[in-house]
Image (cartoon, grey):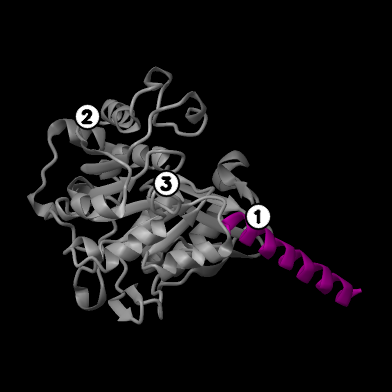
């Protein structure tokens, strides 16, 4: 029986850059085996040496996570859609056209070393072909500026610190309130009434003492954005679309035309919640590399980070636009339509096709 397998962006390079592939099999294991027969380079990324699905590889059968329906033995039928979702998608070497790196860290990863404690801490990363020692060094060398430590910035900074990002900059002016705690998970009950950046620093340092935290206790405005960004080279900017004094769109638009080198060319991911579709489009129009709308998972966020790290698009200045060339999106991540909605639509179309085939056979 034939099923459709959706390949995640980081693994598409091992499957002729294809997003979807047809495979045969009556179970998840059999379908993945069929997939790796077609594309042998995928095998080491999906299976351990003893033939088991790797712990960081999650496979969904339509809407259902196969980990809870029988794992690799989960039965599948004609027309099903299998979606491969890696739990972490870092470390893939960012190579652009002609073999030249398309994403340059401000610190040379070759100058970074991991001590014995870090090697133990990240040991699960180091054995993964998607990360390895090289990828972990890139994470340690990376510098990320996160504007805001609220509902979006709070979980993001936890994931970044846990993954081993070496330097995290925090920009926030607010204090922790009791009403924050049900969603801003970097803060604790004991932090109520204290500045959010102090609260976030304590939690992140407790999670990973090796991370370097740079704090900017201020409300980001046009006046101080230049001061913050000109003195701190960054490799990635993550910013919310909604901020008190200036919105994220305005900040990115200003940054792109600021003339700050290298920060004016730094990848930008915008996070948004409860925004109109037109505002999502505006995020691209202001020069951001990508926008993510809630709800999003750690895996989807890391997938987008890998996408911008491997982005080979040149920068263009056309009219009032200055940013990545939007005329092409080579190796782009899944469309903005939510994965669950895509799967439901495909399943519905498959059911309709099956019903039509049954009627034709009567």
- Residue 62 image position (x, y, % from top left): 64, 55
Q: Which of marks 3 and 1 is nearer the N terminus?
A: 1
From where the camera sits, is residue 124 visible? no
Q: Mark 2 points at which residue?
A: 209
Q: Does the magenta stretch include residue 329?
A: no
Crowd rating for badge 2 (residues with CA inside 10 Å; few <14, some 14–19, many 20+): few
The magenta region covers 337-362
> Disc 3 vs disc 1: which is toward the camera?
3
Q: Which of marks 2 and 3 is nearer the N terminus?
A: 2
Q: Which residue is drawn at 39% across and 65% down?
A: 40
Callout 2: helix, strand or loop?
loop
What's the mark number on residue 244?
Answer: 3
Query: In this image, 114 relative to 206: left or right?
Result: left
From where the camera sits, is residue 261 visible? yes
Q: Residue at x 19, y 33 (%)?
A: 210
- Residue 338 image position (x, y, % from top left): 58, 57
Give me the C-alpha separation between circle 1 and circle 2: 45 Å
Callout 1: helix, strand or loop?
loop
Q: Nearer the viewer, residue 351 or 211?
A: 211
Q: Nearer the viewer, residue 6 or 52?
A: 6
Callout 3: helix, strand or loop?
loop
Q: Mark 1 points at which residue?
A: 76
| Tag 3 and tag 1, C-beta contact below 8 Å | no
- Residue 334 image position (x, y, % from top left): 49, 63
Q: Nearer the viewer, residue 357 or 268?
A: 268
């Amino acid at each position: 029986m034939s099923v459709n397998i959706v390949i995640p962006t980081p693994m598409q390079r091992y499957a002729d850059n294809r997003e979807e592939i047809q495979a045969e099999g009556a179970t998840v294991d059999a379908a993945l085996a069929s997939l790796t027969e077609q594309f042998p380079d995928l095998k080491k990324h999906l299976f351990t040496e003893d033939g088991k699905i790797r712990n960081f590889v999650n496979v969904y059968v339509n809407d259902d996570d196969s980990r809870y329906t029988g794992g690799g033995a989960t039965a599948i039928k004609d027309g099903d859609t299998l979606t491969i979702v890696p739990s972490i998608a870092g470390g893939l070497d960012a190579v652009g056209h002609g073999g030249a790196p398309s994403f340059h860290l401000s610190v040379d990863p070759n100058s970074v070393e991991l001590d014995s404690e870090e090697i133990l801490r990240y040991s699960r990363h180091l054995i993964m072909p998607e990360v390895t020692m090289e990828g972990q060094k890139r994470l340690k060398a990376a510098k990320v500026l996160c504007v805001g430590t609220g509902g979006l910035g709070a979980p993001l900074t936890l994931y970044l610190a846990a993954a081993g990002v070496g330097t995290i900059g925090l920009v926030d002016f607010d204090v922790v309130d009791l009403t924050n705690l049900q969603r801003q998970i970097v803060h604790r009950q004991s932090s109520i009434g204290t500045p959010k950046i102090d609260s976030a620093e304590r939690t992140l340092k407790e999670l990973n003492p090796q991370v370097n935290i740079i704090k900017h206790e201020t409300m980001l405005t046009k006046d101080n954005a230049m001061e913050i960004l000109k003195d701190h080279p960054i490799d990635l900017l993550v910013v919310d679309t909604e901020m008190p004094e200036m919105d994220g769109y305005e900040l990115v638009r200003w940054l792109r035309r600021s003339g700050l080198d290298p920060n004016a060319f730094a990848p930008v991911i915008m996070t948004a919640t409860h925004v109109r579709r037109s505002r999502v489009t505006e995020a691209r129009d202001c020069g951001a590399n990508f926008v993510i709308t809630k709800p999003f998972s750690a895996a989807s966020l890391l997938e987008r980070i890998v996408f911008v790290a491997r982005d080979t698009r040149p920068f263009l200045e056309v009219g009032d636009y200055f940013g990545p060339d939007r005329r092409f999106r080579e190796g782009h991540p899944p469309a903005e339509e939510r994965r669950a909605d895509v799967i439901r639509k495909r399943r519905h179309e498959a059911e309709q096709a099956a019903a039509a085939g049954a009627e034709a056979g009567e």
